[in-house]
Amino acid sequence: MAYQTVNPFTNQLVKEYPSHTDADIEATLKKADALYHSSWSKGDIEKRLPILLKLANLLEERSEELAKIATQEMGKLIEQSRGEVKLCASIARYYADNADTFLAPVKYNSDLGDAWVEHHPIGVLMAVEPWNFPYYQLMRVLAPNLAAGNPIIVKHASIVPHCAEIFEQLVREAGAPEGAYTNLFISSDQVSNIIADDRVQGVALTGSETAGSAVAAQAAKKLKKATLELGGNDVFVVLDDSDLDKAVEVGVTARLQNAGQVCTAAKRFIVQESIADKFLEKYTDAFRQVKIGDPMDESTTLGPLSSKDALETLTKQVNEAVKNGAKLHLGGKPVEREGNFFEPTILTHITRDNPAYFEEFFGPVAQIYVVKDDDEVVQLANDSNYGLGGSIFSQNIDRAKALASRIETGMVYINSLTDTAPELPFGGVKRSGFGRELSDLGIKEFVNQKLVVVSK
């Protein structure tokens, strides 16, 4: 597996990175395991939290440099890259401020005696992370687990090695000891070997359904804990009483942010029929106004896809959807210019026997579905293999809340796109994975919640 920085705006190779060897992996495992058995991991949490605070400060101080690295490496709009770095700093600071409270002993009333649950690290973790949010994905696993005392070994996506390398450097600069966080440029087979190693106690993966299934099987074979955040085919529900202009404005961002390469992006727009024509008209007009161009240019509103492979995959999906009966309402093909650009695209009239009905489209392609009533909203929303996030737009909050409770996803946002924040749990159900990251829930995924009872 080649680790390379290829600028998706130009498809020019910037730098190649050498892969790590099996000897490098063994040295990493040895250091991480030694750290886990030290007082740094198993001792007072106050030794670890200042590292997160320093890391937050470093991210803020170097935000422009980091943003430019991400934009050059995977094509995210520069303002969105700045936002990602800012979010990472807030996650690090959140756990620096709150982890001691989250991991404090919890008392239980019991007739058996004085009882409480303590929270202890479980050991070395293997993390496998994707390219679409090259810093945020790393921070989601680093911050809570560094606070808890779990050393982390990371395999990042092969198209963002510069982001992977600079993030590791920042963690070390923030004061993390050797073995606390190690980036490795390795293959999937090497990841499997690491998961099988007795020194590794858990696995966290964000990525595709295929990758998640493979890693979960490997972890299960060795009876090791895993968390998975996989794909999504999120709905964006527009009810007949919604603020249509707001729904259109937010809906464009929800589909086109990061060039549509977001697990929680709005992908299936479910619109009630009394407003469907007006919504489609306004939404189409907004798509037509998108400015395609250099992601470093502040005025650009749609950048390139992350790679040539991503462009080819999306093109095949759209062509297959149309071949199977979908109507191409707008766009539908790569942009004839340098780089990995795809036109803002709208598909309608997608039937259940069309592969597009169940697939995740990782790019600027919106699917429009028209339904009669709230029950049909729920039926269509839940007729999916995925269950990550979703949005509901309505001016009747009680109505929207009732629908939110019926939709089978891990997250639902009302009158907003599906978002993220350090204090809110993130994760899904069905083939979108299991487990939660961020918030108080995320930090407890990989800790030993140990019961201690002093008998009466």
Image (cartoon, rainbow, N blue to C red):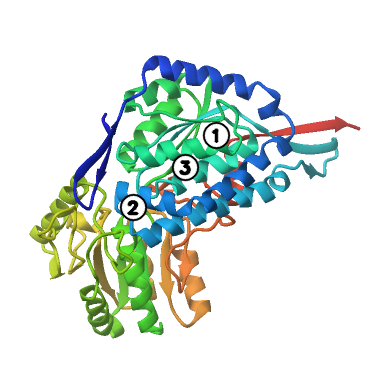
Residue 168, position as x, y percentages in the image: 48, 36
Q: Residues within 10 Å of mark 3 (few under 14, many from 20)?
A: many
- Residue 187 figure quarter: top left
Q: For numbered disc 3, what is the local secondary structure? A: helix
Residue 44 visible in rendering: yes
Residue 379 visible in rendering: no
Up-down relation of residue 239 to residue 99 (above or below):
below
- Name which residue lies at 73% across and 38% down: 46
Alpha carbon of mark 1 to alpha carbon of mark 3: how far?
14 Å
Up-down relation of residue 322 to residue 402 (above or below):
above
- Name which residue lies at 23% across and 58% down: 357
- Name which residue lies at 31% across and 49% down: 72
Residue 322, position as x, y percentages in the image: 11, 61
Residue topped by disc 3: 138
Q: Residues within 10 Å of mark 1 (few under 14, many from 20)?
A: some
Q: Earlier along the polypeptide chain: callout 3 or callout 2?
A: 2
Up-down relation of residue 328 to residue 195 (above or below):
below
Q: Amino acid at mark 3?
A: Leu
Q: Is residue 35 left or right of residue 217?
A: right
Q: For numbered disc 1, what is the local secondary structure? A: helix
- Residue 77 figure quarter: bottom left
Q: Quadrant of the C terminus?
A: top right
Alpha carbon of mark 3 to alpha carbon of mark 2: how far?
16 Å
- Please state which of the two labelled residues, at mark 1 or mark 3, is closer to the viewer: 1
Q: For numbered disc 2, what is the local secondary structure? A: helix
**Residue 172 numbered mark, or none:** 1
Residue topped by disc 2: 71
Q: Amino acid at mark 1?
A: Arg
Q: Is residue 332 left or right of residue 36?
A: left
Q: Residues within 10 Å of mark 2 (few under 14, many from 20)?
A: many
Q: Quadrant of the N terminus?
A: top left
